Image (cartoon, coloured by chain):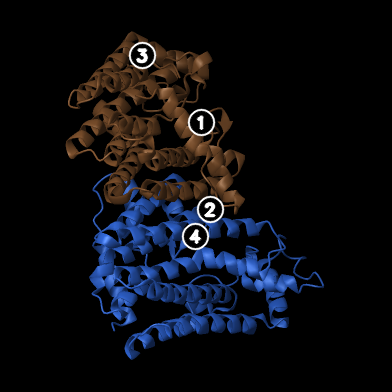
Chain colours: A blue, B brown
Amino acid sequence: MKTSQFLADYINNAISEIQYPASPRGLYEPIEYTLEGGGKRIRPVLALAVCDALGVPLETVKYQALGVEMFHNFTLLHDDVMDKADMRRGKPTVHIKWNESTAILSGDAMLTMATQLVCRNAGDKTADALELFNRTAMEVYDGQQYDMDFESRMDVTVDEYINMIRLKTSVLLGCACEMGAIMAGADTFVRKAFYNYGLKLGLAFQLQDDYLDTYGDPAVFGKKIGGDILNDKKTWLLISALEQDDKGELAAVIGKDIDADVKIATVKGVYDRLDLANKCHELIDQYAAEAIAYLDELNLDADAREFFIDLAQKSCRRTH
Amino acid sequence: MKTSQFLADYINNAISEIQYPASPRGLYEPIEYTLEGGGKRIRPVLALAVCDALGVPLETVKYQALGVEMFHNFTLLHDDVMDKADMRRGKPTVHIKWNESTAILSGDAMLTMATQLVCRNAGDKTADALELFNRTAMEVYDGQQYDMDFESRMDVTVDEYINMIRLKTSVLLGCACEMGAIMAGADTFVRKAFYNYGLKLGLAFQLQDDYLDTYGDPAVFGKKIGGDILNDKKTWLLISALEQDDKGELAAVIGKDIDADVKIATVKGVYDRLDLANKCHELIDQYAAEAIAYLDELNLDADAREFFIDLAQKSCRRTH
């Protein structure tokens, strides 16, 4: 079994080898900029790892792994326009560096390029791979829409929130895993088990993201701590706290234009009183355990099993 | 051979039968609004007409025709955001009626839905249909990028302009025609001839659009006359006039914030002096003739041949 680092290097290399048309530069330059901006590459690594675990060469799923990563970066590009985010991975976002029209159009092109990559060299797997990819894409849009809908709501439930992150984030990790299984020629049972592993991993992954935004180490996290609180973002922490906000302590600061440090301290104070940091990690551990349980359904050798267990455990404890 | 009206009714009926998920409404309502907003439906009509001409039931290309129309409407939705257009087909655009994020996300969903439609019931034609569709989509983005690039340039040539409208508009009409041929099981030669018919038709169609924006009858055209002139839009008329603007008459008003009526009258005055309305129509007629010439390569019965000739001639003389 290849290491996680090997697989990340493999995909970064494949990304750097993508050939873009020479013109119009205004369309393709922002795409290169976005894709080469880095990121954890967890989705393509999952697709490659599944192929590797099933004893099939990495090349088998190379273009599909690229397609999933291209799709992920397309969603980041358009989400950054919708969220009016200025920075991504320490660099100005496309709509800041260029302009909004460029961000929209280059994103559109990335979605079509992602579809082309998913179909590339897929042979008799094309229909299955594309069906999974398109279905997942629709779910991701649903998730983004729910996320936006939540902005204007104060009564979002934890169940609704988990369903939203399942759609917005987790299904694409599930898709990446199943894509590896499809390309490796695995049967439906194996495909489904890998999909569910990715899905649960995605839930743990996103909740850790929420956790780090409030409780991360600013020196390691890479962006300012407390951004979600300042933006009144409906995260698991805030929604859980709102459900128990009997004294209206949170309602008094949410949506209000008050001093940033005061707001962060107030909201964090409520979280701490409710012991939400620990409760969040209990939930993260639960999802990671559920992800790992799906591995039992698969007849993996010790090496491969270890890889996926390790990945799940690391995702729960990552600091950036 | 079915009439153009029959085919338009057929596709409008198919559009009204599309089933959307019940939620999130914020994502799917703008899609219904956009698609049911009308339009000429020329692209799906072309796909259906080709199937009909080749003696194959309309159902054969039904979903691919819908996919092409869905794609076209997706591009309008995103173009309207980029152009900051407030109205489309007499109704407020999506980013005005809802907001910009909705317009971006609903457009993204339309692109994925278009891809799903192109693949639907396509059987062993899936790979060919999808390859054509994705390639065309990339060309349309290239065209939109060139169109935006032209905004800040005063030295655009007529050749560059024709290449831009070929990409932005014509290739999708070519794609619609070839899609009909692919689904009907036609060979490469027939596919290519229909593609080229659509491509040339598209050039005539777009030039007539440019013409109408300046010379149309306001009572019939459906939008204000002179919008392109006021926006300094690099149309065939303006580019041709700029190439001969020895006295700098145009350069003096372009990009200037002067009275709308004065600007329109000044620019139109230059066009008239250069006889550009007639020259534009000569070019339109030339492209229509080239489109019709491709029909000679096809062994169509008189009825079908008449249909495509009629469509090309009407496109050149349409008033809205």
Q: Are marks 3 and 2 on the same chain?
A: no
Left or right: B158 in relation to A80? left
Q: Residue furthest bottom?
A: A302
* Residue in the foreground of this view, choosing between A121 and A27: A121
Q: Are marks 1 and 3 on the same chain?
A: yes
Q: Residues within 10 Å of mark 1 (few under 14, many from 20)?
A: few
Q: Where residue B271 is drawn, which disc sits there?
A: 3
Residue B28 at x, y percent in the picture: 56, 48
What's the CA distance linking mark 3 and mark 2? 42 Å
Q: Amino acid at mark 1?
A: Gly
Question: Can residue A103 be spotted in the picture?
Answer: no
Q: Where residue B38 is drawn, which disc sits there?
A: 1
Residue B168 at x, y percent in the picture: 34, 36
What's the CA distance linking mark 2 and mark 1? 28 Å
**Quarter of the rendering occupied by the N terminus of chain B:** top left
Q: Which residue is mark 4?
A: A140
Letter of the chain that mark 1 sits on in the rendering:
B
- Eye-nearest disc, 1 or 3: 1
What's the CA distance linking mark 1 and mark 3? 32 Å
What's the CA distance linking mark 4 and mark 2? 15 Å
Q: Amino acid at mark 4?
A: Val
Q: Are marks 1 and 3 in contact (CB under 8 Å)?
A: no
Q: Are marks 4 and 2 in contact (CB under 8 Å)?
A: no
- The residue at 50%/76% (across/down) is A200
Letter of the chain that mark 4 sits on in the rendering:
A
Q: The residue tagged with tag 1: helix, strand or loop?
A: loop
What's the CA distance linking mark 4 and mark 3? 50 Å
Letter of the chain that mark 3 sits on in the rendering:
B
- Eye-nearest disc, 4 or 3: 4
Q: Where residue A82 is drawn, which disc sits there?
A: 2
* Residue in the foreground of this view, choosing between A43 and B189: B189
- The residue at 38%/38% (across/down) is B148
